[in-house]
């Protein structure tokens, strides 16, 4: 039961951070203004991979509940 909760929390954090990276890499979330990630397209791909990893962790947590 604790593993399910940990995977869900880690997955949600990874998903959130991945979405922020996508936003910064695409220039839609330019915060902080001095960030090296703003308008840098590699961060869109890194964010997408991290977000997918977060979704996988959440999926695993939900599957282990059964």
Image: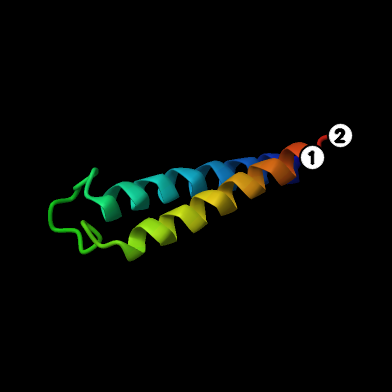
The vertical placement of 62 against 20, above or below, is above
Quadrant hosting residue 29: top left
User: Which residue bears the numbered disc 1?
Assistant: 63
Q: Which of the pair 21/11 is nearer the observer?
A: 21
Secondary element under disc 1, as helix, strand or loop, is helix
Count of all numbered marks drawn on residues in the image: 2
Quadrant containing the N terminus in the rendered view: top right
Per the rendering, the mark at residue 66 is: 2
Looking at the image, the residue that sits furthest to the top is: 66
Mark 2 touching mark 1, by CB under 8 A? yes
Q: Is residue 10 above or below residue 49?
A: above
In screen coordinates, is 64 left or right of 58? right
Instruction: Please tell me whether mark 2 sits on a helix, a strand or a loop.
Output: loop
Q: Is residue 46 left or right of residue 53?
A: left
- x, y percent for residue 16: 44, 43
Residue at image position (50%, 55%) is: 50
x then y, percent, for residue 40: 25, 62
* Residue 31 spot, x, y in % from top left: 20, 47
The residue at the point 69 percent across, 42 percent down is: 59
Q: Residues within 10 Å of mark 1 (few under 14, many from 20)?
A: few
């Amino acid at each position: 039961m604790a593993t399910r909760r940990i995977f869900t929390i880690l997955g949600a954090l990874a998903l959130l951070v991945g979405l922020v990276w996508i936003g910064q890499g695409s220039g839609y979330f330019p915060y902080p203004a001095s960030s090296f990630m703003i308008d840098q397209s590699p961060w869109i791909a890194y964010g997408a991979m991290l977000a997918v990893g977060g979704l996988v962790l959440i999926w695993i947590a939900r599957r282990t509940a059964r």
